[in-house]
Image (cartoon, helix red, strand yellow):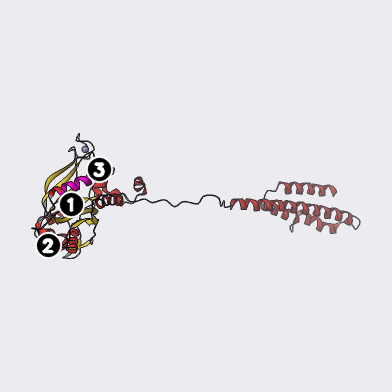
Amino acid sequence: MQEKLSQIRAKGIKEIDEASSSADLNSIRLEYFGKKGLITQLMRGLGTLSPEERPVVGKLVNELRKELEETWEKKNQAILHLEAEAKLEKERIDVELPGRKPRRGNQHPLSAIIQEITEVFLGMGFSVAEGPEIEEDYYNFEALNIPPEHPAREMHDSLYITDKTLLRTHTSPVQIRTMEELYPNPVRIIAPGRVYRRDAQDATHSPMFHQIEGLVVDVGITFSDLKGVLTEFIKKIFGQDRKVRFRPSFFPFTEPSAEVDVSCLCQGSGCRVCKNTGWLEILGSGSVHPNVLRYAKYDPEVYSGFAFGMGVERITMLRYGISDIRHFYENDARFLEQFR
Ligand SMILES: [Zn+2]
């Protein structure tokens, strides 16, 4: 009997010693002290012993039970402590770690160019004017010397809302609205804004894009004022070493009219950007047509002026070497972050 007890003792202490988790200890507890546990069975077996043996063996079994219980409890405390520490370590928050920084945004390249161009003109005494994007036919066409049957209307694939209102096809209606507002005072404004055409989207076309309009009206304004202002502007935006060229052109609302080109970075040796011409078309311009002045009540015998308009996307694409206009509207952070 004593041998059996010492075997149970040795086995129990070894198992408790080797236990590495609460789950291990739990199954050991059942193995020894559960309903059918080894110790429980020994206690029950005491009843079958003779009255002489019973107290002797009973004492030994009690001692063994006490020893195993104490060993188990000690180990249990140690494991609970380790497990609590492990849990704390896992859930630990290092308050000294820097937090997640929000991503820093930056100006959209189109906004940046609009601002840059605006600042150049503010420096030359211009102010900024605005007009509605939903425009009346009168301001978008008629008052700009484009009557209903005028072939120039076909150039603008317009998005009409009603018979008489449309999404403006250019920023030029701001010319008329500003003259109406300022008459008979001199006008010197630029008008940046969105314009709309019924164009299918491709690498160089978009149904919505941005223009900047310019208008100067005063007594004694000549074509050389136009040339002076636009040459100064183009050199400020593209660089003092670039050449500027004025080419005769036609617009219904200016007379005479000129397309304005800037020399290409290839310096005339020819490249893909300038299609081997050495020149890049930047804007349209001209002296304000007498009819346009008349629509806004300015007497063309007294007043004269010049107007110009440019595409913001085109200038931004030339400035940064962007080959596809669609990049501007896709909001791809990888594209936009390059202009930080
Ligand atoms: Zn070139």
Taking the image in four quarters, ligand 1 sits in the one at top left
Dot 1: what SS? strand
Q: Which residue is mark 1?
A: 308
Q: Earlier in the sequence, mark 1 or mark 2?
A: 2
Relative depth, front residue between 115 and 31: 115
Q: Is residue 282 visible?
A: no
Q: Residue type at mark 1? A: Phe
| Distance Cα–Cα, label 1 vs label 2 | 18 Å
Dot 3: what SS? helix
Q: Which residue is mark 2?
A: 295
Dot 2: what SS? helix
Relative depth, front residue between 149 and 13: 149
Q: Residue at x 14, y 44 (%)?
A: 246
Residue 117 has which mark?
Answer: none
Q: Which residue is mark 3?
A: 238
Q: Is residue 93 left or right of residue 1?
A: left
The x, y position of residue 111, in whole percent, is: 30, 52
* Relative vertical location of residue 121 with respect to residue 162 in this rendering, above or below: above
The x, y position of residue 201, in whole percent, is: 24, 51
Q: Is residue 37 left or right of residue 52?
A: left
Q: Residue type at mark 3? A: Phe
Callout count: 3
| Distance Cα–Cα, label 3 vs label 2 | 35 Å
Specify the farthest residue to the top: 269
Q: Is residue 134 magenta?
A: no
Mark 1, other Cα within 10 Å: few <14 / some 14–19 / many ≥20: many
Q: Residue at x 25, y 43 (%)?
A: 238
Q: Which residues are magenta?
A: 225-238
| Distance Cα–Cα, label 1 vs label 3 | 17 Å
Q: Name the image quarter holding residue 147.
A: bottom left
